[in-house]
Image (tube, grey):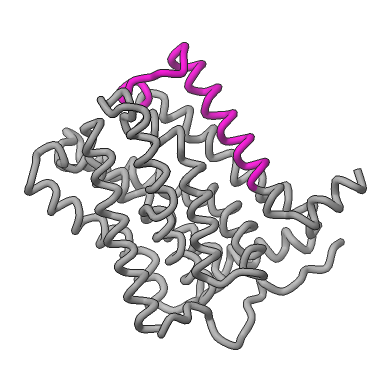
Amino acid sequence: MLALRTSVRKHPLWWYYGITFLLSWGSIVLAVWASTGGLSPTPEEFQLTVPVTVPAMLLGPAVAGLLLTGVVSGRAGYRELWSRLQKWRVGGRWYAVALLVAPVTMAAVVLGLWLSSADYAPRIATAEDKAGTIVMALVLGLVVGLLEEIGWTGFAIPKARRRLSVLWTGIMVGVLWGVWHFFVSYWGGGGTNGGIPLEIFLSLWFVAVLVGQLTAYRVLMVWVYDHTGSLLLAMLMHASLATFQFILNPLTPGIPQQVYPWGHAATAWLVVAVVMLVRRGDLTRGPETLSARKPIHHS
């Protein structure tokens, strides 16, 4: 047991990702199997499993983050995590960035694609119950943001920032965050079920993981967190992304599910480029050190 604890404390990120992927991928595979009786659901069948598969998948980051916080830092770690969750006085401009980046960058892409083809019509445009769709999106976004960021920002990002810059922390966490979404992207986005050959889907998915929308957005999330130290704000920024993905994502399986994310990736990276230009390439907070980056005494 002592050797295990020593290993976790020495390599916390490796353990975090290992536990997260094991719990999330294992849970979503079991949930899909139990709901559909197999592992090749159509996009429509997968949508019906979302009330089960999404909560099951979200267990990974949340459980891994909380478990490893206790192992690595004990009670002091939980107190520090709670203090970051309570930190809400960070300035109105940061709330504006956290809540508006996702809808603005997505809406610009959706409107352009929708004008070119009805296949890119956003969910909200085709929904019969628009009010219900918005409420569902808000609830889903808040749940996703809360549970995921307990792990990603609550645990992984502070550990990565001790060694990496804001940009490289965002890229590293963003890439693994994208990989973590594999089954949702494959089953929910259509994949071969949407008429895209497996080799093409995997090629597009692999490149999207490296430079796609989630990686760019995570860089922005790390930048906001580095300046505020607020886990609450990170949760809200993630919630904004999940909410507007649900509202604005086109429902047509296949090609639209592959093209739309690339458009959002381009606009998100454009925002990253603008921020870096304004900041002259320096995304860090400055000479001060966030409390989350200070060593925590074990208890």
In magenta stretch: residue 33:
yes
Residue 198 lies in quadrant: top left
Helix, strand or loop: magenta stretch:
helix
Q: In which quarter of the image is residue 249?
A: top left
Q: Give the total number of marks visible in the rendering.
A: 0
Q: Nearer the viewer, residue 90 or 282?
A: 282
Horizontal side, residue 219 vs residue 85: left or right: left
| Left or right of 7 on screen, residue 263 | left
Residue for point 7% across, 48% down: 115
On the image, the x and y values in percent for residue 218 come to 45, 60
Q: Residue at position x 38%, y 28% from top?
A: 187
Which region of the structure is painted magenta? 17-46
Task: Name the residue located 73 percent from the left edge and 50 percent from the top edge.
Answer: 68
* Left or right of 119, for residue 190: right
> Which residue is most to the bottom?
287
What is the residue that sits farthest to the top in this orientation?
Answer: 37
In the depicted structure, whether residue 66 falls above or below residue 83: above
The percent coordinates of residue 45 (x first, y second) are 35, 20
Query: Is residue 105 or residue 176 the one in the foreground?
Result: 176
Residue 51: quadrant of the picture: top left
